[in-house]
Image (cartoon, helix red, strand yellow):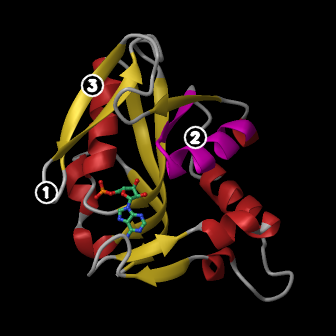
């Protein structure tokens, strides 16, 4: 773990709540102040890195805030970054998985040649809510024959029980919101 106590502040203090965004009733966890502070950002990435075992072959980042943490984590660990994207963004052949939203469905995609059978990955996103996004990502990785060693989040909204959607995939979250 990284000591980030230079001025008695902690990286957790750089995440702010924005009520009723993007719609009424949702408390949005805004990580932009954390990203804007070099010490806080570095401290989070170091804490994420502590959760990744040495046998992991690649980091899988989920669009879009998962790209930010995933890319920094991959760099810190000397690993590559695989991007899981919203529909129509990846240019080569893709696998797609649909998942349920509160109203309707959405889809995520991965390049078919992004990973090989037997590869071990860690999936990274900023926040775990209901788990639908991460579960779809796990499904995409499995379609390629690769293995998800763990899912990693900066924030977990524990009251939504998102870990249930991930079944037996280990989940590590740095900050739990009850
Ligand atoms: P879910 O699929 O329900 O687990 O939602 C997780 C995804 O939605 C992540 O990519 C988050 O960035 C985003 N998300 C969901 N709820 C929030 C929230 N309260 N604050 C910030 N991002 C959220």
Which residue in the protein does label 1 denote? 103
- In terms of image quarters, where does ligand 1 lie? bottom left
Which residue in the protein does label 3 denote? 96
Q: Is residue 102 above or below residue 116?
A: below
**Where residue 93 appears, x then y in whole percent?**
38, 10
Task: Using the rendered view, name the quadrant where residue 162 is placed.
Answer: bottom left
Queried whether the magenta region covers residue 29, the answer comes back as no
Tell me the quarter of the image containing the N terminus: bottom right
Depth check, front residue: 27 or 131: 27
- Horizontal relation, residue 127 to residue 131: left or right: right
User: What residue appears at the point 27 percent right and 80 percent down from the top-left corner?
Assistant: 24
Which residue in the protein does label 2 denote? 53
Depth check, front residue: 146 or 61: 61
Classify mark 2 as within 8 Å of ligand 1 or not, answering yes or no: no
Which secondary structure class fits the magenta region best?
A: helix
Q: Secondary structure at mark 1?
A: loop
Q: Residue furthest bottom?
A: 8
Marks 3, 2: nearer the viewer: 3
Marks 2, 1: nearer the viewer: 1
Depth check, front residue: 104 or 135: 104
Residue 116 seen from this side: yes
Q: Secondary structure at mark 3?
A: strand
Residue 1 seen from this side: no
Q: Earlier in the sequence, mark 2 or mark 1?
A: 2
**Where residue 4 appears, x then y in whole percent?**
78, 74
Marks 3, 1: nearer the viewer: 1
Queried whether the magenta region covers residue 66, the answer comes back as yes
């Amino acid at each position: 773990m990284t000591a980030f106590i230079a001025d008695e502040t902690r990286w957790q203090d750089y995440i702010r709540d924005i009520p009723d965004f993007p719609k009424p009733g949702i408390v949005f966890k805004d990580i932009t102040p954390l990203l804007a502070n070099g010490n806080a950002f570095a401290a989070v990435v170091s804490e994420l890195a502590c959760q990744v075992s040495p046998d992991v072959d690649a980091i899988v980042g989920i669009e879009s805030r998962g790209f930010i943490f995933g890319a920094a984590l991959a760099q810190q660990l000397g690993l590559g970054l695989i991007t899981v994207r919203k529909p129509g963004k990846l240019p080569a052949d893709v696998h797609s998985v649909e998942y349920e939203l509160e109203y309707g469905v959405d889809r995520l995609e991965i390049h078919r040649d992004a990973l090989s059978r037997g590869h071990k990955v860690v999936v990274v996103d900023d926040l775990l809510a209901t788990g639908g996004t991460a579960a779809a990502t796990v499904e995409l990785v499995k379609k390629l024959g690769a293995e998800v060693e763990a899912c990693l989040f900066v924030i977990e909204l524990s009251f939504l029980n998102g870990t249930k959607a991930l079944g037996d995939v280990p989940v590590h979250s740095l900050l739990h919101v009850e």
